[in-house]
Image (cartoon, rainbow, N blue to C red):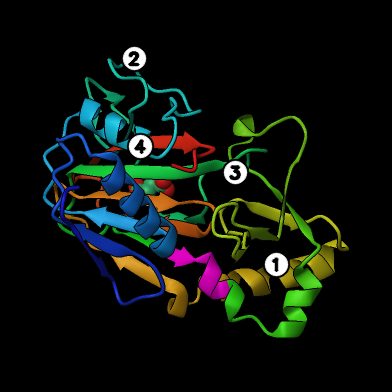
């Protein structure tokens, strides 16, 4: 086994993993221990990596099948890599998502089977802004008033992407409270970016409740902010976290490689 340390952020979620060089293959015991730390902390980050696209895909594969992202991207040699960037070359964007704020969301919750694990590797970052923050759905659920927990337990919400062309023809619905399939822990699963309305309640009543739940779920007590450095790889569990990106000056460059897993082997 490769020796490594797991250092919790001290916030509601997240930990740094120190001592692994992700250019190298990992043995089965190391993968099992990293996976355990991932399930415990929801977000893991690895600093000072110098990995290739193939290394990122190999590392992702330890946790599930990396798939090409559902959104189209320019042709590229390794299709499982999705470039997130504001940079344009010859007048064409090299990636997606620009420089604007992206509000809190769990990846791809507008699909009937949302993304489970996502990874992001930083190649170029702006001097200021473009930080990513994560919120713990576990901590938010656990801090709810017991009566409210009971009231929301059986509710469902409709999730939609603001770009209508990305949505499925039938509305996508998920429980407001999900149970993580691997940890068995309960999570609040609504977000300001992608949750449209609560399906089981009248619109007005549902709107008030949804606003209350979202305000609670993104409260600072449950949020941890990552200060990116070039060479950081962050992996997160969309089944129990949401994330948000702060905006940055579009004259600065931000280039990230991303991989996406749907479903996840139990490793
Ligand atoms: C995302 O929302 O998936 C992108 C996060 C980021 O660019 O930091």
Q: Is residue 142 above or below residue 97?
A: below
- Please give the residue where the numbered disc 4 appears in the rendered image: 62
Labels 4, 1: front one:
4
The first of marks 1 and 2 along the sequence is 2
Disc 3 + disc 4, Cβ < 8 Å:
no
Q: Is 139 colored magenta in this rendering?
A: yes
Q: Few, some or many C-alpha atoms within 10 Å of disc 2 (few <14, some 14-19, many ≥20)?
A: few
Which residue position holds label 2?
Answer: 75
Label 4 vs 2, first from the N-terminus = 4
Mark 3: is the Cβ under 8 angstroms from ligand 1? no
Disc with the residue nearer the chain's start (3 vs 1): 3
Task: Say above or below: 230 vs 244.
Answer: above
CA gap between label 4 and label 1 equals: 36 Å
- Which quadrant holds the C terminus? top left
Which SS class for mark 1?
A: helix
Q: Position of residue 46 (x, y in %)?
A: 21, 53
Look at mark 3 in the image and give the residue it sits on. 162
Distance from the alpha carbon under mark 3 to that under mark 1 = 17 Å
Mark nearer the viewer, 3 or 2: 2
- Pointer 1: residues within 10 angstroms few (<14), some, or many (20+)? many
Residue toward you, 256 or 14 = 14
3 or 2: tag closer to the N-terminus: 2
Using the image, tell me which numbered label, if any, was put on residue 210.
Answer: 1
Q: Is residue 245 visible?
A: no
Point out the tag, 3 or 4, that comes first from the N-terminus.
4
Q: Is residue 219 visible?
A: yes
Contact (CB < 8 A) between labels 3 and 1?
no
- Depth-wise, is mark 3 or mark 1 nearer the camera? 1
């Amino acid at each position: 086994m490769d020796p490594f340390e797991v250092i919790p952020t001290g916030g509601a979620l997240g930990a740094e993993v120190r001592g692994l060089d992700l250019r190298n293959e990992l043995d089965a015991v190391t993968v099992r221990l990293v996976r355990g730390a991932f399930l415990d902390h929801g977000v893991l980050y690895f600093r000072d990596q110098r990995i290739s696209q193939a290394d990122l895909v190999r590392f992702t594969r330890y946790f599930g099948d990396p798939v090409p992202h559902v959104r189209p991207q320019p042709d590229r040699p390794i299709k499982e890599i999705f470039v997130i960037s504001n940079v344009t070359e010859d007048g064409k964007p090299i990636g997606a998502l620009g420089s604007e704020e992206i509000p809190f969301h769990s990846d791809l919750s507008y699909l009937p089977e949302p993304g489970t694990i996502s990874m992001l590797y930083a190649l170029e970052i702006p001097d200021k802004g473009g930080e990513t923050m994560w919120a713990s759905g576990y901590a938010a659920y656990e801090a709810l008033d017991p009566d409210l927990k009971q009231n929301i337990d059986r509710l469902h919400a409709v999730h939609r992407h603001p770009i209508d062309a990305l949505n499925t023809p039938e509305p996508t619905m998920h429980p407001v409270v999900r149970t993580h399939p691997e940890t068995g822990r309960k999570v609040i699963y609504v977000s300001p970016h992608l949750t449209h309305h609560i399906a089981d309640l009248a619109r007005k009543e549902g709107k008030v409740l949804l606003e209350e739940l979202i305000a609670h779920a993104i409260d600072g007590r449950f949020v941890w902010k990552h200060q990116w450095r070039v060479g950081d790889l962050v992996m997160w569990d969309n089944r129990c976290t949401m994330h948000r990106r702060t905006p940055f000056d579009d004259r600065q460059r931000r280039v990230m490689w991303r991989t996406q897993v749907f479903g996840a082997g139990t490793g």
